[in-house]
Image: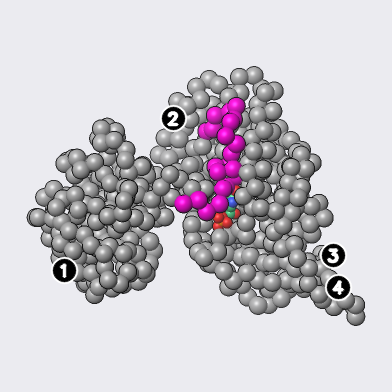
Amino acid sequence: MILVLDFGGQYAQLIARRVRECRVFSELIPYDTPIEEIRARNPEGIILSGGPNSVYDEGAPRVDPALFDLDIPILGICYGMQLMALDLGGEVGAVQIREYGRSTLEVKDHSGLFAGTAEKQRVWMSHGDAVFSPPDDFVVTAETPSAPIVAFEEPHKKRYGVQFHLEVRHTEYGMEILKNFLFDVCDCRADWTPVNIITDAVEKIRAQVGDARVIAGLSGGVDSATAAMLVHRAVGDNLTCVFVDHGLLRKNEAEQVIEAFRERSDIPLIHVDATGRFLDKLAGVTDPEAKRKIVGEEFIRVFEEEAQKIEDAKFLVQGTLYSDVIESGTRDAARIKSHHNVGGLPEVMDLDLVEPLRNLFKDEVRVVAAELGMPERMVWRQPFPGPGLAIRIIGDVTAERLEILRQADAVLQDEIRNAGFYRELWQSFAVLPTIHSVGVMGDARTYAYPVVIRAVTSDDAMTADWARLPYDLLEHISNRIINEVPGVNRVALDITSKPPGTIEWE
Ligand code: XMP
């Protein structure tokens, strides 16, 4: 097992996830986790993540220097390398020209981390400070044109540092370098598989809930279904699933979800029609964070009411993913938006949460889902946010606008599936900005809504690119939406990646 100490970098969890991709279990923990706790976890190695600070900033996160006395291999990445340098007697300073993005690294010593990689390689950097002189006994193993000490090591004590981000795909040999650390330096075994994830999750769930009854919120997506199946393995008949129709779903979605679930499972399912109640609360609300919080709270209130009808129901299962957690903001990372199931939760809740997927990314969940025997259609279902169409109507949510968006979205889904693009897109959906523009149809003036098409590719929702859909397909979608959806006279295409945009508009 490898522990990753989190110094607040946006890519910190990506490091843990890359380690798991190498089939070694890894977990992200706060940088100030006490040394005794770290030792007790018995990791084969420790990785120090990057972070937004300079080591010299006031209040910059530091580690207990005793960490470096542990007889455990340590790899520092970016900020983590600079911390290691500073704490072990090296020197760190501000570089004259900050470096963001691609750089070419030259390897000076192929014996350790760089074994089996090329002399010159593309790496991805993002830093304002750098190591100016290494601690005693450290050798410099790589340089870039602007940073003479871009990697160093002390192989006897097994201390390693790299200034570049080996965890991002743009770093050419990132995975090889990571594997050298995991398998050559730390002597890890590649035996962490989806089956382990399942066994481990089931054990943890049993330990958490004991004999209590549990309810699981089901959305129709792969995350909540996977979470519910794991809990079912753990507690069997003590689980009841609850599907809440909040009136913000896509066309025919509620019926389809219920039918598909009942076809494949005999876990009891309660269907709550809460349409009016959510729409009442959302009336006149335009602020995206307010919408998210209303939906987050209302979901919990409905679950609490359902739980009261079941004797001894104390826990609520949610399919929360790591990307929901990081975007909602953590102590060390900035809030981008409050995902309904994390930042949108009310402060006081009757039910304790069970979230077996909280440390995983979506593609890891899909592997688990497939291992659990879920049908392909479910495993590869595109994500749909908990607040649903409420965050795709840019402005206040009304029944009329929901109907327009639902119809436009149904056309888009239909065309994307028929053209064979559904699975290769991370998401494809329609957005309704609540503005009007002028058009002309049948020789008459129109003054109606535009619909925006959003289609993106992504691995894990942390970054995304807008999909280059064929013009013919776009033309067809545009014609159909305008002809078939009353109230729409214009179709636009969103060509923004993430960053700088986010996938959803709100
Ligand atoms: P953004 O818009 O932040 O979205 O780039 C990243 C992914 O998360 C989904 N999303 C949510 N999922 N509750 C959810 O269950 C939410 O509140 C929420 N907000 C965004 C979004 O659809 C995308 O897949």
Would you say the magenta stretch is mainly helix, strand or loop? loop
- What is the CA distance from the residue labelled 3 to the residue labelled 2? 53 Å
Q: Earlier in the sequence, mark 2 or mark 1?
A: 1
- What is the CA distance from the residue labelled 2 to the residue labelled 1? 47 Å
- What is the CA distance from the residue labelled 3 to the residue labelled 4? 11 Å
Which residue is depicted at the point 19% across and 69% down?
148
Dot 1: element: loop
Start-end of magenta stretch? 334-354
Marks 3/2 in contact by CB < 8 Å: the verdict is no
Q: Earlier in the sequence, mark 3 or mark 4?
A: 4
According to the picture, the residue beneath numbered tag 2 turns out to be 203
Residue 38 pos. (x, y %)? 28, 37
Q: Is residue 438 left or right of residue 11?
A: right
Q: Where is 178 relative to 30, above or below? A: below
- What is the CA distance from the residue labelled 3 to the residue labelled 1? 66 Å
Number of other residues with Cα within 10 Å of mark 3, as a class: few under 14, some 14 to 19, many 20 or more? some
